[in-house]
Image (cartoon, helix red, strand yellow):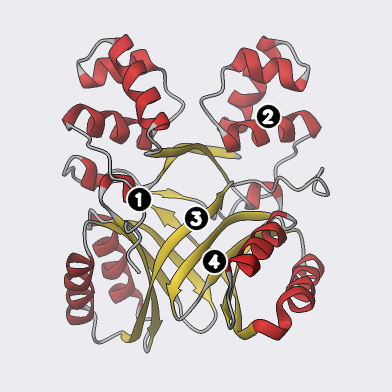
Amino acid sequence: MNINDNIKMEKIDHLDRKILSNLDQNSRQSASSIAKKCRAHKNVVNFRINRLVENGIIRQFVAMISPSALGLTPYKIYLQLQNLTSKKEEHIQQLIKSFPVYWAAHTSGQWDFIIGVLVKDSQELSTINKTILNELGEDIIKKSVFLLTEAPHYYRKYLLNQKDFAVKYWIKNQPKQKVDEYDIKIMKILATNCRTNVVNIAKNVNLSVKTCMTRIKKLEKNGVIYDYRISLNLGKIGYMYFKCFIALKKAEKNRLKEFFAYCQSNPNIIHLIECVGEWELEPEFEIESFEKFQDNLSEIRNKFSDIIKSVETINILKEYSYICIPLTESRNSY
């Protein structure tokens, strides 16, 4: 199944790509700031952003929040299921909403669903695991749970054929930061739409605008909020979303460093996840075609055959969530 089969593609021109690239680097920046960089009028930029949202190309403006700063640990749960009907898929979607999820997706390949959760401790992870078994156990063919240890994300260089940008890291080795209920409310708003006006944020959390601005700046300064990105509906612009699972036969430091540099320089790799489980590395691709993806895989296999044992792939068909802070009602404190 091709991710684009049931999606109407939208035409985007060079200015749209420039706007998307700027939003990808900082989706909270003002239209005026983007207009200066794009050499366009502010009103034109505003119109284009609204159109990109209305056409479904931009799915979400995302505040990137460090899990370690909140004392949370990220895990991914992979599920292969049998007898998967549309009714069961709806049930799984509802089940996912009850978890402290940061990302979840329906996929094709060796796995059917990936559920990324942020947990406070092993007991919370165990509770989630038991819930999945109780709700889906009869249909589970295979299940794997992975600890995420590092996750650099790269800006979308392919939008304008750009060179390397600085790398940002989602999982940081930083101490837990002190946040209160107002900080959490602010982050939950920014996590779902980081372009929300500070006046509206202040109104929703019952704080003054000045206090709200001060809190946001503090969250940014302390590395709790460390970036602002966009989530794209790739099928709308003719791209596909693939994930690789790379099992290593060696973890030689210099060769791994070269592999990380390769991923950073590759314009179509947008994340590289390090994990503990059946495999060690998960590069993720946003790319124009399956054929080009296969060319990339061949290059990786040839360049790093001395450290790579095996490579498996899946196609991300549908993303259900991309929220870098759990929104469940039960999670009111960190």
Q: Are marks 2 and 1 in contact (CB under 8 Å)?
A: no
Q: CA distance from mark 3 to mark 4?
A: 22 Å
Q: Are marks 3 and 2 in contact (CB under 8 Å)?
A: no
The amino acid at mark 1 is Ile
**Is residue 265 placed above or below 138 in the rendered structure?**
above
Residue 231: x and y, percent? Answer: 44, 43
Q: Are marks 1 and 4 in contact (CB under 8 Å)?
A: no
Between 237 and 28, which is closer to the camera in this rendering?
237
Q: Is residue 222 visible?
A: no
Q: Secondary structure at mark 2?
A: helix
Residue ID at (18%, 32%): 13
Q: Are marks 3 and 4 in contact (CB under 8 Å)?
A: no
Q: Which residue is mark 1?
A: 7
Q: Which residue is mark 3?
A: 319
Q: CA distance from mark 1 to mark 4?
A: 34 Å
Q: Secondary structure at mark 4?
A: strand
Between 199 and 173, which is closer to the camera in this rendering?
199
Mark 4 is surrounded, within 10 Å at the Cα level, by few (under 14), some (14 to 19) or many (20 or more) other residues, namely some
Q: Which residue is mark 4?
A: 149
**Is residue 87 placed above or below 213 in the rendered structure?**
below
Please report whichever mark, 2 or 1, sits nearer to the chain's N-terminal start.
1
Q: Nearer the viewer, mark 2 or mark 1?
A: 1
Q: CA distance from mark 1 to mark 3?
A: 14 Å
Q: Which residue is mark 2?
A: 186
Please report whichever mark, 1 or 3, sits nearer to the chain's N-terminal start.
1
Mark 1 is surrounded, within 10 Å at the Cα level, by few (under 14), some (14 to 19) or many (20 or more) other residues, namely some
